[in-house]
Amino acid sequence: MASLRSALVIQALLLFVVVNSFPVRPYLSAKKRSATTLCLSTTSGSSAVRSYRPSTPTDSLQLLSFYRFVPISNPEAIRDALFEELLLLPGVRGTVYVASEGINAQFAVPVGDQLQSLLRTFGKEGCLSFDAFEHSPPNMGDIVDSNVSTFDRLIVRTRDYILRDGIPLEDGDVPLDWSDAGTELNAEDWHEQLQQKNIQLFDCRNDYESDQGTFQSAQPLNTKTFSETWKVLDDQVKSDTINPNEPVYIFCTGGIRCVKVGSYLKNKLGCKDVRSLRHGIIGYERWASDAGQSLWDGENFLFDKRRFSKEEPGQSDKES
């Protein structure tokens, strides 16, 4: 009898060890799990992930994006805090990248209380040690029907960079200062200044994006990946395609790439006056729709699943 009792105790201990070693953990209460699948967690490494799949939304979704370059000493702690907060917002989906250089996020959020709660989460009264909107409000995109494909999951993950750039640094080089990236113009000022003659206007996106549409008179960099940008800019300054003594206008989809491009142009290549489009093409399209005028030709390339969806005639197709 004693031997049987000992054997049962050993089996119970082994079962406990196996269950608690399993890599998939339910982070939600039973009530919350009724609206989601189990959360997946990989909590170590430079690309650690917290994610879950929300229930199918029934309300309209507000698309929005934002970023902030700010030093973060413990990205893993920020990742975990954000994940736990965002789990409390039913139906929220999108991707958040957290790195030592800052935070970058794209969301599709049910319109109403969840949207306001999400903005509070990332604002000055939220769970972060900084206000993500201190220097710029979120870039509000379209409001779309719940059946429009956007993001499958909510994903919060740590990375080495919020925007991997591939900028070559040699021994002794000081990393570029992302806070010194030139002047941001609002959409109206951008529109007015682009009508000047012989301006230096550069499309900082990749070739497959520029091929879909761009600003009138813009020069594409014709890159395949963002990391090719720096050699192209070096060559254009050397060949006098870019005159560092004249204003240089740059734009991208939502603005984040222009932070790094602007800093490189100013601090590495000596351009004295760099001007970028605040909130990128997304912000300009929003302004142009209200203003009834536009200097944009073509479409804006999307990075969420809507670009794979068949659309009804007349439906707009913009990135969030």
Image (tube, grey):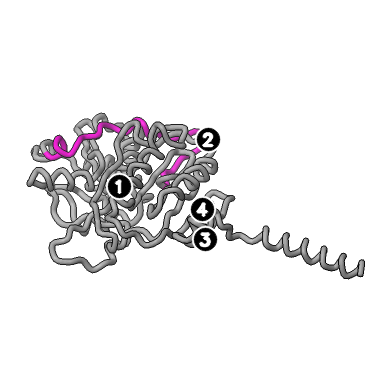
310 vs 190: above or below? below
Disc number placed over residue 112 in the picture, else none = 1
Which comes sooner in the sequence, label 2 or label 4? 4
Which comes sooner in the sequence, label 4 or label 1? 4
In terms of image quadrants, where is residue 2? bottom right
182 part of magenta stretch:
yes
Please name the amino acid that badge 1 sits on. Answer: Gly
The residue under label 4 is 49
The residue under label 2 is 73
Residue at the farthest right position: 2
Instruction: Out of 35 and 263, give the one closest to the viewer.
Output: 35
- What is the x, y in percent for residue 3? 91, 68
Distance from the alpha carbon under mark 4 to that under mark 1: 28 Å
Disc number placed over residue 42 in the picture, else none = none
Please name the amino acid that badge 3 sits on. Answer: Leu
Distance from the alpha carbon under mark 3 to that under mark 4: 14 Å
Labels 3, 1: front one:
1
96 vs 240: above or below? below
Please name the amino acid that badge 4 sits on. Answer: Val
Instruction: Out of 78 and 256, give the one closest to the viewer.
Output: 78
Q: What stretch is highlighted in magenta?
A: 164-191
Contact flag, marks 4 and 1 (Cβ < 8 Å)? no
Which comes sooner in the sequence, label 2 or label 3? 3
The residue under label 3 is 38
92 part of magenta stretch:
no
Q: Residue at x 35, y 40 (%)?
A: 119
Q: Which residue is drawn at 56% across and 54% down?
A: 42
Q: Which residue is drawn at 26% across and 42% down?
A: 279
